[in-house]
Amino acid sequence: MRRLGERGISPLPSRNPEEPIISVEGITARFGEETILADVSFQVRRGERFAILGGSGCGKTVLLKHLVGLYRPYAGTVRVMGTNMTEVEEADLIELRKKMGVLFQSGALLGSLTLYENVALPLQAYTDLSPAAIEEIVRMKLALVNLEGYQNHLPEELSGGMKKRAGLARAMALDPEILFFDEPSGGLDPVTAAEMDHLIKSINTGMGTTLVIVTHDLPSIFGVASRVIMLDKGVRGIIAEGDPGTLRETNRDPRVVHFFNRQMAGRDQEER
Amino acid sequence: MDSRTSIPARHNFEVSGPAGEEKTLAISGRISLENLGKFLDDVERVFPRSAPQGLRVDLSGIRYLDSAGALALLNLRERAESQSIPFQFVNTAEEARRILVLLDRPTLHTPPLIAGRRSANLFEQAGESSRALAGDFWAVMEFVGELIRGLGYSLIHPRSVRWNDVLFYMKRAGMDGLPIVSLISFLIGLVIAFMSSLQLKQFGAYLYVASLVAIAIVRELGPLMTGIIVAGRSGSAFAAEIGTMMVNEEVDALRTMGFDPTRFLAVPKVLAAMIVVPILTLYADVFGILGGLLIGVMFLDLTVYSYVDWTLWSITLFDIVASLIKAMIFAALIAGIGCQRGFGVRGGAAAVGSATTSAVVAGIFLIIVVDSIFAVILHYVR
């Protein structure tokens, strides 16, 4: 019997798995004089499929950009994997970002690079793997999002849904612990949207990745999310929190009822 | 399996079983991107040299597996199977099994649908460039036709022109460009006067500095320098603006609303440039002559009166009018090529960049070509 592979890589800091992976405490987002979010607090648990809901202009995307550290809050703190995003140094933020993947609304692929090059980019920059190993991984990631064979295509040669899936392959390149999605099913046909939802869910169940999804698409919410918060433009904060099925059945707040029943605001009073 | 952060990035191998018979490979620890390179090296070392009767890979000790690690395990299985070694994963934890199932798909080795972009050989490149050049010429001609039609329509129906846009671009290309045009012309006038005075000193013909500066600036350098500056400032801006609109489907939106994009976007820009560039050229002429005047008065013992007198004696009204017409044609070329390059954008950000570059390069090239033609024509007309 022989032992191989024992080597002295320093262990990563051990953390309590029960600790929330994202913890937002009283954040206020403000642009100039306009307050978008006021005193918003919530937590995301490890392995959860967490969705941020709300109508257009309620600050969902702004909140997402605060979570990934693109914006810094006017007040309050955002902790991601134990790191305070409001005080973190730029160098540490880069380390943290390697453990997070973001899928932007349009995929945000670099237009001058092929899909292969897009997905390989973080692997080439942040790992010391051989080109052959990187190629294997990129092909696997593309196969995972059902884009096998498309490695030599340029983004402009793909449809909107394919661009999104390729964006997802790139976001997953480093096997992040948290994946953020901005409107993953927005602009997709119902079948493609359902496939996207299935894909997202399979990543969560297969790899245990925590998902944070910004969406207003009802089928996506019920198909994917295990817990949601709902934002509202009027209160500039959270008006409901919980599992989406329960919220729909039990929450009597007219704003929540309208949202889940696709009704126009003020419609039910008129009909009575 | 535990959460990723709590597991150190290392792995262990234990190989057991007598040589030649079924072997068990027990893998434990963590296999992820951080230690994947080492893992692959170690697999190379422990993979049985002489084919065993079977290989059982015991995954009971795996504490964390990411997708790259799972892929490495699947590749291990594939390698064994390619050597006809019966292979089996045993004691697979539920989490590890889930990720292995997620990745285990026959499509993993699908060949690319289109071949990679290889660099073409000399003949292919020459052919491709010629075709592109011909296509480009055709596209420019087509656009020139549309533009002339649009300008003609605007002449007949002046109310159809978006005059607010024209004023906006007049300010952008004209007023905002005035400081740099004035400064550059002033310096050029200064340099011409200084350099020519060194030569004319030998003949005591200082007074001719005034006429040299006046003729050089008014006939050639005034319109030319203004044209080059406007190509750099405004031609590029027009190409980038329309190019970005192409990428964002704004031009398609205009078309579906029944607007002619050339008339809507290009005509105001071209009109604005044609109005404002001759005015800029006049400024350039004045500042160039002022530059010469400064040298004449400060270093050549000329009076302001005699310098201005000689300047007015050397240039004719014909020179000024011809220079303004030339400037107007330059303006149409610069703005036109800027818009045409913008409308030609297909794709994304990189295409906008190359359209902008191309607008400036083609603009300056066309200015010089037309300037040469003017030089010949004016020689015979005068």
Image (spheres, coloured by chain):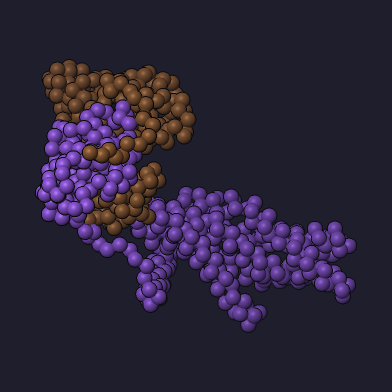
Q: Residue furthest front?
A: B18
Farthest residue to the bottom: give it: B380
Residue depicted at x 64% and y 56%: B181
**Of residues A218 and A71, the one drawn nearer to the viewer in this rendering:** A71
Give chain B's shade: purple
Seen at 54% across and 63% down, the residue is B331
Residue A270 can be seen, yes or no: no
Looking at the picture, does residue A168 appear above or below residue B188? Answer: above
- Coordinates of residue A72 in the picture (x, y in percent): 43, 28
x, y (%) of residue A138? Answer: 28, 49
Q: Which chain is brown?
A: A
User: Which residue is at the front of the view, A211 or B147?
Assistant: A211
Q: Compared with residue B345, is residue B248 higher up or lower down, i.e. above or below?
A: above
Res B96 seen here: yes
Quadrant for the C terminus of chain B, please: bottom right
Q: Quadrant of residue B92?
A: top left
Left/right of residue A21 with respect to residue B92 in the rendered view:
right
The residue at the point 87 percent across, 74 percent down is B202
Q: In this orientation, which residue lies closer to the viewer: A209 or B141? A: A209
The number of callouts visible is: 0
Identify the residue at horizontal 21%, vertical 32% (top origin).
B61
Q: Nearer the viewer, residue A143 or B98?
A: B98
Percent coordinates x, y for residue B274 in the rendering:
53, 61
Q: Quadrant of residue B209?
A: bottom right
Q: State which quadrant residue B300 falls in.
A: bottom right
> Could you tell whether B186 is left or right of B86 in the image?
right
The N terminus of chain B is located in which quarter?
top left
Q: Position of residue B161 (x, y in %)?
A: 43, 56
